[in-house]
Amino acid sequence: MQKPEILAPAGGMESLEAAIYTGADAVYLGAGDFNARRNAQNFDEQALCAAVRLAHRYGAKIYMTVNTAVFDDEMDALLATLALGCGAGVDEIIAADLGVYALLRRCAPGMKVSASTQMSVHNLPGVRLLEELGYDRVVLSRELSREEIERITSRAGIEIEVFVHGALCMCVSGQCYLSSLIGGRSGNRGLCAQPCRLDTRVPDGEPYALSLKDLSLVERAGELAELGVKSLKIEGRMKRPEYVAASVGALRQILDEGTASPSSLEALQSVFSRSGFTSGYFDARLGPEMFGTRQKEDVTAAAGVLGALQKEYAHPTQRIPVGMEVTVRQGEPVSLRAWDQDRHEAAVHGDNPELAQRRPTDEALCRRAMEKTGGTPFFLEELTLLTDGVSMAPVSELNRLRREALDALGEERGRVSPVPFTPCEVLSGAPYRPRKPLRWRARFDRVEQAPMDQLDLFEAVILPAGELCRHWEAFPSGKRDKLWAEVPRAVFSREEEVADILRTLREKGCARAVCGNLGAVQMARDAGLAVSGDFGLNIVNTPALDVLENLGLSDVTLSFELTLQRAKRLEGNVPRGMLCYGYLPLMLTRNCVLKNRLGCQKCGRAFHPLTDRTGRAFHAACEEEKESMVLYNAYPLWMAERMEEMEGIDFATFYFTRESREEAAQVLEDYKAGRGRDNITRGLYYRKIQ
């Protein structure tokens, strides 16, 4: 069984050294503004090149994160960032935006690309689609169980990476818009303000209902290796170097020795936790035990282990085996040739040896000198002494040659090998020409919400796939051609069930599916349905639209993190639209706080309030399949009196969730009349997120 890679975080150079010196196989880091930890120290050009040299010297790899959403007006800066990574010789780029992937394939086809966990890929169909696109690796969502991971690894054709330690977001990564809607700081842009860590409550419930404990699967590393996971990822680019050392050190012990020492596990617990750790997702045991906050005891516990952890990475781990050939013979200079398993080689020469007066240089003496590799990445694995049996090289000479040879070998290993990068034109400057007039679509959570006498207002009526399948005949036969199925954004363990529903809908006459996740896109394609992309795909730029066009998507609902101005400036050929009404879905979670407090029977799939520290009430409800929960904004997006400002796109969608049929009908009347309302939001359509 091949050992999986230990992939460690580095927010700065000291954390990078801590990771490498304690045994990490690879390190991921950020450079520039397009990484999901923009508030970390991060790496400029000089530091990035130094990081690559250091890592390669020690046999480790560097993965650069470019894992945020990128707007069209940032494409020049994005190209510069990608060129920086390629020029520095990073081993892989982790991307979250389909547009970033598209540019890498055009400008740097030799660069490995990994799909960030921000792409929300959590099932086999999603992995299959990434494989079709040409990704080399995918970082799976953190919410998966052991069985779900095994289902993917046993069938995947690309490498699988899994988080094993660190913070857990309450929301499926890539599907959280809470921070951006509340304060304009987007998690999808690397500036999440972590509002889920603040006091939020279900009625009569405990505080901090959205704050999860940190994940730790460190002691389960062997299980993950058996599943075929290629890379074990540690979260924490905002954490201190001692945290990196503790997590890498414990993982290294478990993978190499089968177990970690009690002191290592104690240090891991002490250096950072939120009331302990959880493995709830991996063990398929969701519930209140997974939740926790950072307590005073958690903070004070770190003080007792920081000094010892600093010593752990004060000196490098000797991890690279080398062979050495020493020549000590009359008539030629003393020489040393050193090599590693990657065919790097260095040779150095000294003075001619003396005739031995007492003891000639033998293998035992030579070995003692060559084994002194402390402070370097190397340890002696193989030694050959070529001698005539009468010559003597002073120990000081042998030591000097060893130092020079290993220095030269280290320099050779750390030599930067840039990945070829060819700049390309990203935008043509040709404006997109939308269909006119602006078309209306409506999405309903339940069939009883739909005003049957107003269906002619819409070019499409969208319902969750299961709901539509059960109630297909509730719609007049003459209107069924406009019925589209919404595939759930989260399909964790129900792939076959959802696939059966989609096939049944196809047989009933449904022709199109609306998909907000790459896995959903693949499932719809497998069922023979045309595909409309939804907001969950986080499409914010022209290159990403081009990728979806090449995949055959009919049209796309753009991310509601775009301003109207940016949306209308997008180029490309794919028809595009935006939401024009609705309580925007701010979080998609697998852990249901309503179930934790109320239980499913008492909840009844109703909308229940979650109140934040300001008294603002957000409403939450579970999806019909009870695989996920959605938290909705406190106020509805309202554009009735500004619909003319949405001209420039093809369609506008009414997103109905908690409304009754009468309330939905009144919304439509207000939009037809262009009437405004109080207690509404314009979302982010007129304010740029950071």
Image (cartoon, rainbow, N blue to C red):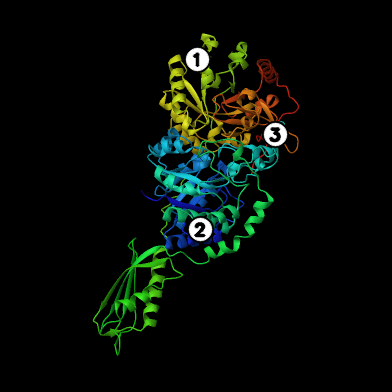
**Spatial CA span between label 2 and label 1:** 57 Å
Check if mark 2's residue and mark 3's residue have beta carbons within 8 Å.
Answer: no
Q: Amino acid at mark 1?
A: Asp
Check if mark 3's residue and mark 1's residue have beta carbons within 8 Å.
Answer: no
Question: Horizontal and vertical percent for residue 479?
Answer: 53, 12
The nearer-to-camera label among 2 and 1 is 2
Nearer the observer, 310 or 172: 310
Q: Amino acid at mark 3?
A: Gly
Q: Residues within 10 Å of mark 2 (few under 14, many from 20)?
A: many
Give the residue at mark 1. 481
Q: Secondary structure at mark 2?
A: helix
Which residue appears at 47% of the width and 46% of the height?
220
Q: Is residue 541 visible?
A: yes
Point out the residue furthest to the bottom here: 357
Give the residue at mark 2. 19
Give the residue at mark 3. 205
Q: Is residue 688 visible?
A: no
